[in-house]
Amino acid sequence: MRTTTSADGTTIAYERAGSGPAIVFLPGAFNDAATCAPLADLLQDRYTVIRPDRRGRGRSTDAIAAADVASYEVQREIEDLDAVIAAEGGEAAVFGFSSGAILALQAAVAGSRITKLALYEPPFSIGGLAGHAKEGLPAKLAALVVGGKLGDAVATMQIEGIGLPPQLVEQIRQSPMWPRLEAIAQTVVYDATITRAPNLPTPEMARLDVPAIVFSSSESWPGLRDAAIELPRHLARAEYVDVPGGADHSIPAEATAKALDDFLRG
């Protein structure tokens, strides 16, 4: 494990392996550095693979106190990414998963030193997800976190932010994994802010001169796949690739590694 310090004093912990051009993996909501490990492991013979815990997760700290969670701005996590890239050579390709893919795009627009973008099922409110983003969700979640209702914050994000059925969320709430989700409840405010309404690709993204590839799978949730297919039409230099085996918003490591390697070498 390595660490670097972000602009606001947050310690960002990350795993680093391999050698070659750098790739940073940004996971989505409720994820940590382990999420992209199977994919990164398949690429470390050709690339330097870097898997950070986003702030407030895993071994990373968070300079934002729970009482101040409503003050979160996406710029804080862009600064986190910039700190990792600066510590590992000064530029990198970025693979973003789910809301982490939207964060990666926002970082590229903000001027982060990103050479190429790989975006796995970014949940923009386009295509089959049109109108999905809920107004006021970040503020609602922040109020729950400040009030100490961490379980309710997690459940609200899962139902209103992700779209899971309430009965499934109740089953998850009774499972052994629930305390781990409550432990990172503050971060649901961050992902809800990254994907806040209207959650559409911006004109700045449309002008972005960074090569991008967008991934999804025919076996994934239809809304996410539709949004992924639609996204390249909103970006200047993007293509869509369907990878087999990605059921239920998961990353099929072998198929994605091959397609990602082809893209990075191109």
Image (tube, helix red, strand yellow):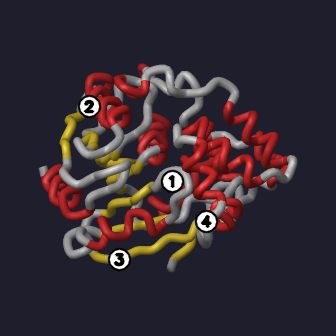
Kindly indicate the quadrant of the structure image that contains residue 228.
top left
Residue 77 visible in the current orientation? yes
Give the camera-side residue of 117 and 193: 193
Foreground tag (4 vs 3): 4
Disc 2 + disc 3, Cβ < 8 Å: no
Please give the residue where the numbered disc 1 appears in the rendered image: 82
The amino acid beneath tag 2 is: Ile
Q: Earlier in the sequence, mark 3 or mark 1?
A: 3
* Left or right of residue 46, residue 204 in this image: right
Disc 3 + disc 1, Cβ < 8 Å: no
172 to 234, vertically: above or below: below
Mark 2 surroundings within 10 Å by alpha-carbon count, few (fewer than 14), some (14 through 19), many (20 or more): many
Question: Is label 4 in a helix, a strand or a loop?
Answer: loop
* Left or right of residue 83, residue 157 in this image: right
Foreground tag (1 vs 4): 4
The amino acid beneath tag 3 is: Ala
Disc 4 + disc 3, Cβ < 8 Å: no
Residue 37, image x and y in percent?
A: 37, 69
The amino acid beneath tag 1 is: Asp
Disc 1 + disc 2, Cβ < 8 Å: no
Kindly indicate the quadrant of the structure image that contains residue 121.
top left
Question: Is label 1 in a helix, a strand or a loop?
Answer: helix
Foreground tag (4 vs 2): 4
